[in-house]
Every structure is written in C-alpha cells, then in structure tokens.
Amino acid sequence: MPHHKSAKKALIQSEKRRLRNRMFKSRVKTEIKKFFSYLDKGELEKAEAQLRLAQSLLHKGVSKGILHWKKAGNKLSKLFYKFNKVKGQVAS
C-alpha cells in the first residue's frame, strides 16, 4: 500500500485508467467478433458496416493512447484482407 498522499492518488488514477482501457479493448474485441460472424454468414453489407465501426474504434484507441499504432494497423490490415478475400470469392 502507498504511504504518501501522491502515491495514493496515483494508485487511484492508474486503477481508473486500467478499467477504462480494459472496457475499451473489450468493446473492440466484441465488434471484431461481430464482424467475423457477419463474414461467416455471408452478410457482406453488415460485415462492411461492422468493419468500418471496428476501424473507427481502433483509430480512436490509438489516438487515446490505449492501443499501439502498429498493433492497430496490423489488426486492420488483417480484417480488410479477410473481408476482401471473401468479397472476391463472392464476386467470382
């Protein structure tokens, strides 16, 4: 346990940040799972809308400092790759 007033405050602040970051990351994961479920069902319009939402959340996470920009970029790249792959299979 912290002994100084500033250390106690820092502990409270870091706990608040941890919970907020955890909540945000959980939401991002949920939206990505929804994207994959739409993709598996073959609902491309819904999947594309969900992909745009996930993209927005990933960019927001980077700007807030919750996610590293390279991790978000890699995640987006994989999502778009899978979406375009399925979209290409449906088109041909």
Image (spheres, rainbow, N blue to C red):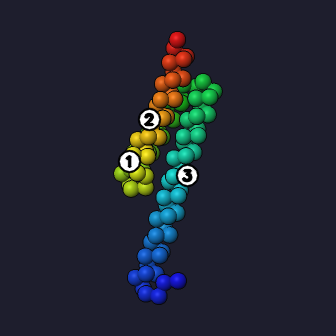
* Disc 2 residue crowd, few under 14, some 14–19, many 20+, Cα 10 Å: few
Q: Residue at the location (52% across, 11% down)?
A: 92
N-terminal label among 3 and 1: 3
Question: What secondary structure is marked by label 1?
Answer: helix
On the image, numbered disc 2 is attached to which residue?
77
| Residue 85 as seen in the image, left or right of residue 70 | right
N-terminal label among 2 and 3: 3
Residue 11: % across, % down: 47, 76
On the image, numbered disc 3 is attached to which residue?
26
| Residue 4 as seen in the image, left or right of residue 32 | left
Q: Residue at the location (44% across, 38% down)?
A: 76
On the image, numbered disc 1 is attached to which residue?
69
| Residue 83 as seen in the image, left or right of residue 40 | left
- CA–CA distance between discs 2 and 3? 20 Å
Q: Residue at the location (48% across, 35% down)?
A: 78
Residue 64: % across, % down: 38, 55
Viewer-nearest residue: 84 or 51: 84
Question: What secondary structure is marked by label 2?
Answer: helix
Residue 82, above or below 34: above
Residue 52 in sight here: no
Q: Residue at the location (45% across, 72% down)?
A: 13
